[in-house]
Image (cartoon, rainbow, N blue to C red):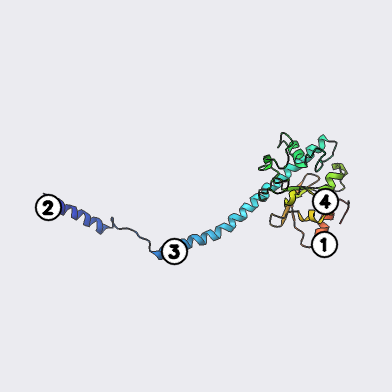
Amino acid sequence: PHCLYSEWNNHIINQAKGSGIMKKNVFTLIELLDVIATIAILASMLLPALSKARAAAQKTKCLSNVKQHGLGFMLYAQDNQGALPEIRDANWIFWPAKVGQAAGVFSGLPDPSDAVYANSIFVCPAYPTRQDGYSPYVSYMVNYYITANYKVDNVKNPSGVALELESTGNGGAMWLLASVAADRANISWRHSDRNNVLFVDGHATDVQQPKSDAATKEFVNNTLCDGYEAI
């Protein structure tokens, strides 16, 4: 009986081998390298598209932020006889706190260095995390001329004059005095050479970076100064 069992067992094993059941599929080194190369090619094709889609989403979210700022500015002006918030008042309350409170984003008036700003509408999603200066969480700056000298109704060209632009954040930049070269250098063009700009009438759109010094001066004079202290 033992012999019969052994013969039968060997017969079953031989049949399995012959039918391929016990065969193993083994990748050769060349085949493995082919698979890796194919994956690398696909990744090189997909990554730029994903990066472009991510940048577009960041720009869209940033523009949404700017539009919400516009609502906050308008609500603040309605409650203050048409006046826009100062860049910083006597109590060292900065404009983002007042705009955020008016828009319902903040319940109080937090300092821009407060972590409550970190994931708020005052940070562009394409803006790198910063901890320098006194404004690590704000990536936008207001037009100094407008906030310091005007009520909304006094602006000559509200649909063409910028109230807020995107900032590089260098040195905690939260306002822009157009006649100061260092301030002009803090205008950020992080969205493929474009800046999401809020205008005094409340509309927001992206603006192309000027390509020359002359074009930059024209942009500043037409978009920021409203006839006040042109450069």
Name the N-terminal-most of marks 3 and 2.
2
Question: Which element type, helix, strand or loop, lies under badge 2?
Answer: helix
| Circle 3: residue type | Leu
Q: On the picture, is 79 further left or further right than 206?
A: right
Name the N-terminal-most of marks 2 and 4.
2
Name the N-terminal-most of marks 4 and 3.
3
Residue 124 placed where, x, y %?
Answer: 68, 48
Residue 43 placed where, x, y %?
Answer: 53, 58
| Label 3 Cα neighbours within 10 Å, binned few <14 / some 14-19 / many ≥20 | few
Quarter placement of the C terminus? bottom right
Name the N-terminal-most of marks 3 and 1.
3
Viewer-proximal residue among 49 and 231: 231
| Circle 1: residue type | Ala
Residue to which mark 4 is pinned: 177
User: Residue 214 shows which numbered tag?
Assistant: 1
Q: From mark 3 to mark 1, how far is it between C-alphas? A: 55 Å
Instruction: Tell me whether circle 1 and circle 4 mark residues in contact (CB < 8 Å).
Output: no
Residue to which mark 3 is pinned: 33
Residue 47 placed where, x, y %?
Answer: 57, 57
Question: Which element type, helix, strand or loop, lies under badge 4?
Answer: loop
| Circle 2: residue type | Cys
Looking at the picture, does residue 227 appear above or below residue 93?
A: below
Q: From mark 2 to mark 1, how far is it between C-alphas? A: 101 Å
Residue to which mark 2 is pinned: 3
Looking at the picture, does residue 163 appear above or below residue 48?
A: above
| Label 1 Cα neighbours within 10 Å, binned few <14 / some 14-19 / many ≥20 | few
Q: From mark 4 to mark 3, how far is it between C-alphas? A: 58 Å
Question: Which element type, helix, strand or loop, lies under badge 3?
Answer: helix
Name the residue: 71% across, 36% down.
106
Instruction: Tell me whether circle 2 and circle 4 mark residues in contact (CB < 8 Å).
Output: no
The answer to whether any part of residue 205 appears in the image is no
